[in-house]
Image (tube, rainbow, N blue to C red):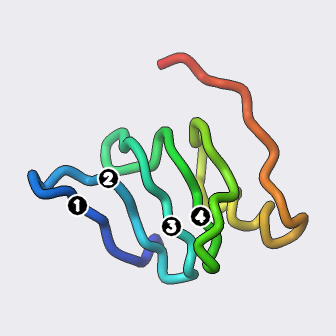
Amino acid sequence: MITGKFIENSLGDFIGFEYDNGFVFKGEFNSKNPFNGDIFNPAGKNIYHGQISGDIFEYFIEYNETGKIKKRPFLPQ
């Protein structure tokens, strides 16, 4: 279960999500799922920019295990 809170702009559009584990996603959403944007680690450092394919938690796990996130190929919609 995803826990945290959405970040909204002044129009009420979702522009990010703050996860309870300290990671933050800022970017575009596809049906309330992160789609394309930036991931920031709990210290606020930008650790990824690009398309999110699959479960964003896989990105967090990869970062915690290796200290980086490898780029994934762009998936056309």
Q: Is 37 placed left or right of 7 in the picture? A: right
Residue annotated with mark 4: 40
Spatial separation of the CA atoms under disc 1 and disc 2 = 5 Å
Spatial separation of the CA atoms under disc 3 and disc 1 = 13 Å
Q: Residue at x 58, y 72 (%)?
A: 44
Query: Few, some or many C-alpha atoms within 10 Å of disc 4 (few <14, some 14-19, many ≥20)?
Result: some
Whole-percent x and y of residue 15? 32, 53
Residue annotated with mark 2: 15
Whole-percent x and y of residue 28? 38, 42
Whole-percent x and y of residue 76? 54, 17
Which of the two labelled residues, at mark 1 and mark 2, occupies the earlier sequence position? 1
Residue annotated with mark 1: 8
Q: Residue at x 45, y 71 (%)?
A: 2
Q: Are the residues tagged 1 and 4 within 8 Å (C-beta)?
A: no
Which of the two labelled residues, at mark 3 and mark 4, occupies the earlier sequence position? 3
Q: Which mark is residue 30?
A: none
Which of the two labelled residues, at mark 3 and mark 1, occupies the earlier sequence position? 1
Spatial separation of the CA atoms under disc 1 and disc 4 = 17 Å
Q: Residue at x 31, y 43 (%)?
A: 31
Q: How many marks?
A: 4
Q: Are the residues tagged 1 and 2 within 8 Å (C-beta)?
A: yes
Q: Amino acid at mark 2?
A: Ile
Query: Compared with residue 72, is residue 49 higher up or lower down, i.e. above or below?
Result: below
Q: Amino acid at mark 1?
A: Glu
Residue annotated with mark 3: 24
Q: Secondary structure at mark 3?
A: strand
Q: Are the residues tagged 3 and 1 within 8 Å (C-beta)?
A: no
